[in-house]
Image (tube, helix red, strand yellow):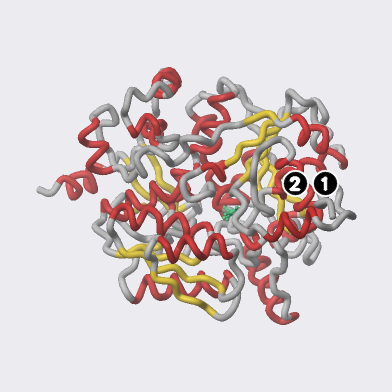
Amino acid sequence: MNKYLQLQMQGDAYLKCVNPKCGLEYPIMSTNVQCENGHVLDVIYKNKPSSNLKETFYQRRNSKGNIFNESGVWRFRDLLNFCQINTEDNDECSKYLVSLDGAEGRQSKPYQMSKAAEFTGINKEGLWLQPEGYNPSGSFKDNGMVTAVTHAKMVGAKKIVCASTGNTSASAGMFAANEGINCDVYIPAGQIAPGKLSQAYQYGAQIIQVEGNFDDALKQSLDDAKNYDGYTVNSVNPFRIEGQKTIPFRALEYLNWESPDWIIYPGGALGNTSSCGKALMELYQWGWIKKIPRIAVINSDGASTLSDLYNGEFEGEELRWNKGNPNTELISRYYNHLDKKGLRPKTKATAIQIGRPANIIKGLRALEFTNGVATTVSDSEMLDGMSVVGLNGFDCEMASGASVAGIKKLMGEGIIKKDDVVVGILTGRQKDAMIPVDYHNNPKNTFANPPKK
Ligand SMILES: *Cc1c(COP(=O)(O)O)cnc(C)c1O
Ligand SMILES: [Zn+2]
């Protein structure tokens, strides 16, 4: 019997619907991104990993030429072993695990940035920012794309498909090119940064321009994937979520597995929020961490679905996970309201210009588990956040500036405290050169650095 058919039957890892009342299960070889009742799925592992692995992960930082140790994703492969391979067997790793020669996640870890600390009001020793833009395609998406493409290969997919505000297509295109598989990317015409679009061209991806916004592009890509046998690598894919767990894993490892008080993310489709929530749920369940960090999700005030619903700013009801039964009718009414009023998500931070976050249900679970918060920041606050990161010698894009701006805002509101330990995720590097150039040429901006005439 084919090895994968055997695995499918053994099922040490499998897929399970997140809704506890439904709880349908599927074999790991399934390419469903939803159960029959339309709920999203989790990857579940039957075995509890030993906490001795902490030492193994640390040792692997001396990679000894092994690319799966060098990789900041696969270094933690024992905690995402949905391929069910012997993680110490290099031949098996090479055969199944997709990697850009160990580059994914390799350079991202939390750094202290004193000027950003001063800007946000957090103690210098307490603020950590983790630049995920230092991934090979320039954003955190690579963490989850390696795992999604690994699963795509495992099920024999010939073509991967995604909708994108830019960074997903760059990442998907890069890994597809490296693996020699086809890649279709659906992008909202005219709404993605040239630096991101150029990557999709360069990597040989087939670009499909959709009239409309990201939400329209996602709908079309999901339909086309279904009708033309494509493998979807958007963050509705549960294997994307597995790889992105390594973002908090790396942060925690650098903090000696002592939980910070907060982990902060910009909120778009909420894949990152979902994966951080799942990572923390698993670590807590295994007893690897004693304290649960609180997650803060920072929306743009022009694309604030989660913040509006979570904070009861629409119809007065605060949307909650509610033991797996969130009020999905409230969500539908919110979307209808947006449509009826012709309200389109609007921010210059195109990476988070998303009105219908595909992972809202898992995002709510993450907020519930971590006693999280959601809030919004303006474009100008994000630009300041982005710019102060630059003054520390690091680089990030405007959407990532939301993490810094959000910390400052929550600190000002007394929700985050000066002495708290805070990890902010800087999701991507700058790919829209005119944004900082315009910012610095306007002397009215807080951190403007105008040229001499
Ligand atoms: C994709 C992306 C986001 C949004 O992340 P989600 O997981 O969709 O919430 C934020 N910033 C950057 C730079 C991105 O590429
Ligand atoms: Zn279900």
* Residue 37 shows up from this direction: no
Up the image or down, 292 lies above or below 412; here it is above
Q: Which residue is mark 1?
A: 447
Ligand 1 falls in quadrant:
bottom right
Is label 1's Cβ within 8 Å of ligand 1? no
Residue 32: which quarter of the image?
A: bottom left
Q: Residue at x 22, y 36 (%)?
A: 92
Question: Callout 2: few (<14), some (14-19), or many (20+) C-alpha neighbours within 10 Å?
Answer: many
Name the quarter where the C terminus is drawn: bottom right
Which amino acid is tagged 2?
Ser
Up the image or down, 385 lies above or below 93; here it is below
Q: Is residue 126 left or right of residue 253?
A: right
Residue 365, percent across and down?
59, 48
12 or 100: nearer the viewer: 100
Instruction: Give the mark count.
Output: 2
Question: Callout 1: few (<14), some (14-19), or many (20+) C-alpha neighbours within 10 Å?
Answer: some
34 or 413: nearer the viewer: 413
Residue 362, percent across and down?
56, 51
Q: Earlier in the sequence, mark 2 or mark 1?
A: 2
Residue 387 shows which numbered tag?
2
